[in-house]
Amino acid sequence: MSQQMIAIISVYDKSNLETLVKGFSENNIRIIASGGTSKLIRSLGYKVEDVSSITKAPEMLGGRVKTLHPAVHGGILARDIDSDETDLKSQNIEKIDFVVCNLYPFKETIAKENVTIADAVEEIDIGGVTLLRAAAKNHERVTILSDPNDYEKFLVELNDKTIGDMPGEISKSLKNQFALKAFEQTANYDSMISDYFRKQYSSNKSQITLRYGANPHQKPAQAFIASREELPFKVLGGSPGYINLLDALNSWPLVKEISASLNLPAAASFKHVSPAGVAVGLPLNDVEKQIYYVNGIEGLTPLACAYARARGADRMSSFGDWIALSNIVDVPTAQLISKEVSDGIIAPGFEPEALEILQKKKNGKYCVLQIDPNYEPEQIETRQVYGVSLQQKRNDAIINKNTFREIISKNKSLNEQAIIDLTVATLSLKYTQSNSVCYAKNGMVIGLGAGQQSRVHCTRLAGDKADNWWFRQHPKVLGMKWAKGTKRPEKANAIDLFVTNQVPTEQPEKSDYESKFETLPEPLTEVERKEWMSQLTDVVLSSDAFFPFPDNVYRAVRSGVKYIAAPTGSVMDKEVLKAADSFDVVYIENPIRLFHH
């Protein structure tokens, strides 16, 4: 066989081609090219052979078949081993040393207006992708050029006679670089094609088009899954938005995991990818029923109690929330939801009458998603930030009663209710934007500080929310006389101003505040505040990472915290523990950090 090196060229984008061909010619490299590429090279005055000269077969099917032939791919895939040499010789096939190929412009075609499926199909490159993958697979011997911008650096090495033992050799590092680029190009190309046909053939199955992304100007937007024939959820009402799905797909695993850990129904109220409230279905006392607006309602199920707690924990933050429920939605729960301002719900199922209630909400536009409870995502998750893909193993840490075994404080008394509350608080942190600190009591989150750069600010924010929750149960709040027609959100705002000692003193806010009451309540005095706060006890606190200073403990105990669960690892661990011991706090070392972004 001839020892002359061979290059095969088949390109749609003919940029810089003349420079490359000139380099091949000057290095006595035999050039074989397909169709229009061959015509262009010949018109430039360079010697070139058509692909048919080695395949002994003409291009066919309107150009669909050009290079798909053993004479081409055998020459590319052959290795420098005896058995391959024997096979080539028996078939009279010569080795190909260089493959130059780029692909039909599928992306540009589908971006055109009024493009048809037939138009798109004709721009799906078959032979080119096969050339790229074959050459990239055999890159130990073959050099693959898939980007016209790489021709110049390739020619530098081609003309460098000091590389390797033979003229025309290309360094291993450059071959590796070019092979990787070819693999990435074919992967991206296939991804574009599958994305296009997913929208054509699997709309509302494995793909849904969203009105926009996080903001109205961020178009287009979609949700899809590539590993299954269908999305893991079904849209039973309304039309989910981008942020709706962020909330739904963070809140569902939270309630699923809490329910699995505690064997209790769980509910979550989400806003902007962090929980405003989370709870399990423990019975409500009379005061709780009043502050959660469910007093007088008979037949509250455990799931309804979980939802009432989750929604009622921080009504200001839960306004316009996304709801997640761990169990099939029953009628009592749906009836509670129907009275609240909410964007949507995700649950594993709905009783027929409950679904009917929810589908009437917001004039039929209320978003209702039914999640497949058996769905488990892939272990590796990928996200893209500023064009860079980040990949990690998803956080599948299991939080249950065993998480709280390592008690490192002097006080080691941990009761069953505290374990329930710690489980709720810690799992809530797993799905809360970091830094985060969570206070919980009675099977529910009562204060959550999320997304703060300083941990003590998380502790203060969450503590303030816990205090507000507690002050809402004060007799002066329970006895408020509301003006006729005052709505729930207006009551929530007025109560918030009252319990946070921010009653307006200037107009027009003062008049607006006072208009909500039939009888204006007397503000809480400092003595009343102090006396009421002294009655808040047995609160648990969980932190997604270690406390760097004891100031977190000092703030926590002011809100009745008796139990703390947090990772260790701070240089101030001893001081933090010393502070906890000084207040007889039970301090549990959580072995798992729970950052979430």
Image: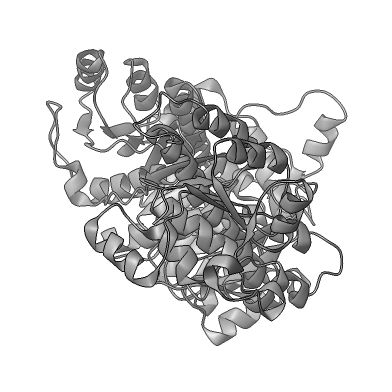
Q: Measuring 27% from the left and 18% from the top, which residue is drawn there?
A: 570
Task: Give the farthest residue toward the bottom.
Answer: 352
Instruction: Reply above or below: 38 against 20.
Output: below
Q: Measuring 19% from the left and 15% from the top, which residue is drawn there?
A: 574
- Is residue 317 rendered to the left or right of residue 519? left
In the rendered image, residue 149, in percent from the top left (x then y), is placed at 64, 36
Q: Is residue 114 shown to the viewer in this render?
A: yes
In the rendered image, residue 78, in percent from the top left (x then y), is placed at 36, 58
Q: Quadrant of residue 336?
A: bottom right
Image label count: 0
- Is residue 265 rendered to the left or right of residue 62? left
In the rendered image, residue 369, in percent from the top left (x then y), is placed at 57, 70
Q: Measuring 55% from the left and 36% from the top, which residue is drawn there?
A: 27
Instruction: Reply above or below: 557 against 370.
Output: above
- Is residue 252 rendered to the left or right of residue 282? right
Instruction: Reply above or below: 506 against 210.
Output: above
Q: Is residue 293 shown to the viewer in this render?
A: no
Q: Quadrant of the N terminus?
A: bottom left
Closer-to-camera residue (414/135): 135
Q: Measuring 58% from the left and 61% from the top, which residue is drawn there?
A: 128
Closer-to-camera residue (542/498): 542
